[in-house]
Image (tube, grey):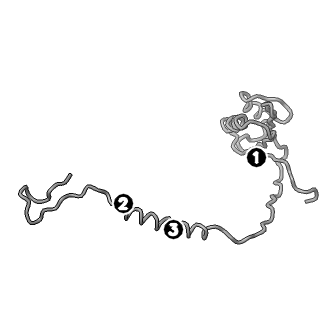
Amino acid sequence: MGAKLSGSGGGRYQEEQNAEINVTPFVDVMLVLLIIFMVAAPMATVSVKVALPPAVAKASPNPPKPIYISLQSNGRVFIQDNQSDLASLGDDLRSSLGAKRNPTKERIFIRADKDVLYGDFMGVMNMLQDNGFYSVALVGEDKRPVGQ
């Protein structure tokens, strides 16, 4: 598996081609990189212990008459206290807003049971966006102590 670099007659500059791969330099470089990363990785972590205070956001003021969409764990959808379904959600929401309020500027509050399937929740979110309701807030249970 060799080839001559000079002419067919051989001669003074006769060299054979080496077809073997020398992996020793490659292994040396990889070991050096491994050691560098093993030494540098612990230095990148934060080792200073800090007791962080809990983040409790203040409640934002509600609009004059907030609109709530409620999702129950069995998949039923309610606008305020009126039952709706996914197909008519946009029309029902517009009718509950009334003619005075601008639907594109309204914030819609979504209350969902903790056992609601993610697909059902995303179906409601997609239907709201398809009908032009882009300002959506999610309502959660307030865990702050009373009096704060």
Few, some or many residues within 10 Å of mark 1 (<14, 14–19, 20+): few
Q: Sequence-wise, which precedes: disc 1 or disc 3?
A: 3
Measuring 82% from the left and 29% from the top, which residue is drawn there? 83
Q: Which residue is mark 2?
A: 23
Q: Quadrant of residue 122?
A: top right
Few, some or many residues within 10 Å of mark 2 (<14, 14–19, 20+): few
Q: Which residue is mark 3?
A: 35
Q: Is residue 17 placed above or below 91 in the rendered structure?
A: below
Is 90 in front, or is 45?
45
- Is residue 126 toward the left or the right of residue 147 in the image? left
Q: Sequence-wise, which precedes: disc 2 or disc 3?
A: 2
Q: Is residue 37 placed above or below 100 in the rendered structure?
A: below
Query: Which residue type does callout 3 highlight?
Result: Ile
Few, some or many residues within 10 Å of mark 3 (<14, 14–19, 20+): few
Foreground disc of the pair 1, 2: 2
The image shows residue 139 at horizontal and vertical percentages of 80, 46
Q: Residues at badges 1 and 3 in contact (C-beta under 8 Å)?
A: no
Measuring 81% from the left and 62% from the top, which residue is drawn there? 54
Q: Which corner quadrant holds the C terminus?
A: bottom right
Foreground disc of the pair 1, 3: 3
Q: Sequence-wise, which precedes: disc 1 or disc 2?
A: 2
